[in-house]
Image (cartoon, rainbow, N blue to C red):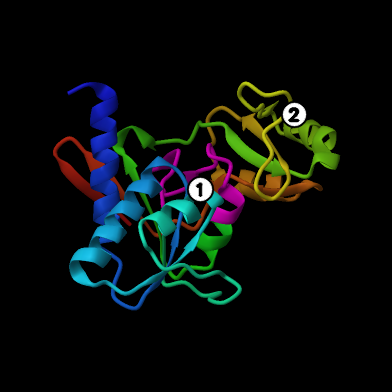
């Protein structure tokens, strides 16, 4: 099996495993991205096959459209501010369950939803689990503060790079109307400390270090591993 196909299969396995945590009557949050899309498909199948009754809060317009297409009933945090469970994918997870998310640019809403849930679960393929985080951290920033935030990032030893829109002029703009600065800090030995430091920068809306993960479902060639 080609490597890409294998990773896709592992994502599906992890998504299906996480979706089994959903119980009748739950209010859930659903993340954004390829793995979250598999969660949506799995939830839709359970609704059809089992008559599962849930309502969901989407973290992006993309997720909202896919959920509607799959006939998943939707709600909002304004109506249901407390969620039973949030399920999402991740870009990287370390052995202490610190997580980096945000390649899809939806990390601000994803973090709000995850913090609104009693339990936050991510599903990943085995390439995403590492001893020490080293992925670039997406930081959502109000455009007015771009230069200041880049200066602060460099002050912490990071290398900031404005996320540019593919085949378009100008930066990627988030659904919240902000820019995203991807910041390389090399190996992140203390994610919690770095999280607090980045959050303290004036003009930062949110960043991609998540420190509230409850459980991770890892799709592997030989099955599922669950870490909590």
Relative to the observer, which residue lies in front, 41 or 136? 41
Residue 111 at x, y = what percent?
Answer: 56, 56
Is residue 30 inside the magenta stretch?
Answer: no
Q: Is residue 77 above or below residue 207?
A: below
Image quadrant in which the N terminus is located: top left
Instruction: Check disc 2: other Cα within 10 Å, few if <14, some if 14-19, many if 20+.
Output: some
N-terminal-most mark, 1 or 2: 1
Near-viewer residue (204 or 27): 27
Q: Are marks 1 and 2 in contact (CB under 8 Å)?
A: no
Is any atom of residue 217 visible in this view?
A: yes
The part of the image, by quadrant, that contains residue 21 is bottom left
Residue 192 in sight: no
**Residue sitting at x 26%, y 44%:** 12
Give the left or right position of residue 216, taking residue 91 as reference.
Answer: left
Q: For mark 2, give the secondary structure.
A: helix
Residue 101 located within the stretch drawn in magenta: yes
In the image, residue 35 lies at what x, y percent? 37, 44
Identify whether 151 is placed above or below 100: above
Mark 1 crowd level (few <14, some 14–19, many ≥20, 10 Å Cα): some
Residue sitting at x 66%, y 43%? 174
Distance between the alpha carbons at the discs numbered 1 and 2: 33 Å
Mark 2 sits on what residue? 154
Location of residue 82 in the rendering, given as x and y in whole percent from the top left corner: 51, 75
Instruction: Please name the residue that numbered disc 1 is placed on.
Output: 62
Image quarter hosting the C terminus: bottom left
Q: Residue at x 29, y 76 (%)?
A: 24
Left or right of 99 in this view: 78: right
Q: Which residues are magenta?
A: 87-110
Q: Is residue 216 left or right of residue 193?
A: left
């Amino acid at each position: 099996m080609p490597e890409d196909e294998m990773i896709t299969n592992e994502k599906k396995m992890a998504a299906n495993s996480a979706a089994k945590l959903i119980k009748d009557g739950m209010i859930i949050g659903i993340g954004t991205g390829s793995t979250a899309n598999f969660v949506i498909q799995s939830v839709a199948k359970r609704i059809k096959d089992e008559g599962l009754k849930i309502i969901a809060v989407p973290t992006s317009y993309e997720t909202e459209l896919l959920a509607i297409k799959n006939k998943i009933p939707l709600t909002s945090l304004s109506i249901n501010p407390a969620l039973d469970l949030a399920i999402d994918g991740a870009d990287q997870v370390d052995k202490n369950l610190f997580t980096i998310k945000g390649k899809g640019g939806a990390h601000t809403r994803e973090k709000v939803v995850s913090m609104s849930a009693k339990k936050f679960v991510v599903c990943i393929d085995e390439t995403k689990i590492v001893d020490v985080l080293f992925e670039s951290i997406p930081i959502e920033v109000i455009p007015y503060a771009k230069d200041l935030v880049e200066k602060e990032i460099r002050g912490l030893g990071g290398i900031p790079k404005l996320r540019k829109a593919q085949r378009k002029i100008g930066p990627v703009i988030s659904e919240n109307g902000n820019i995203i600065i991807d910041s390389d800090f090399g190996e992140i030995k203390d994610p919690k400390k770095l999280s607090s430091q980045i959050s303290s920068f004036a003009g930062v809306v949110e960043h991609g270090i998540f420190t509230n993960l409850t459980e991770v479902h890892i799709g592997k060639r030989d099955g599922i591993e669950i870490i909590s």
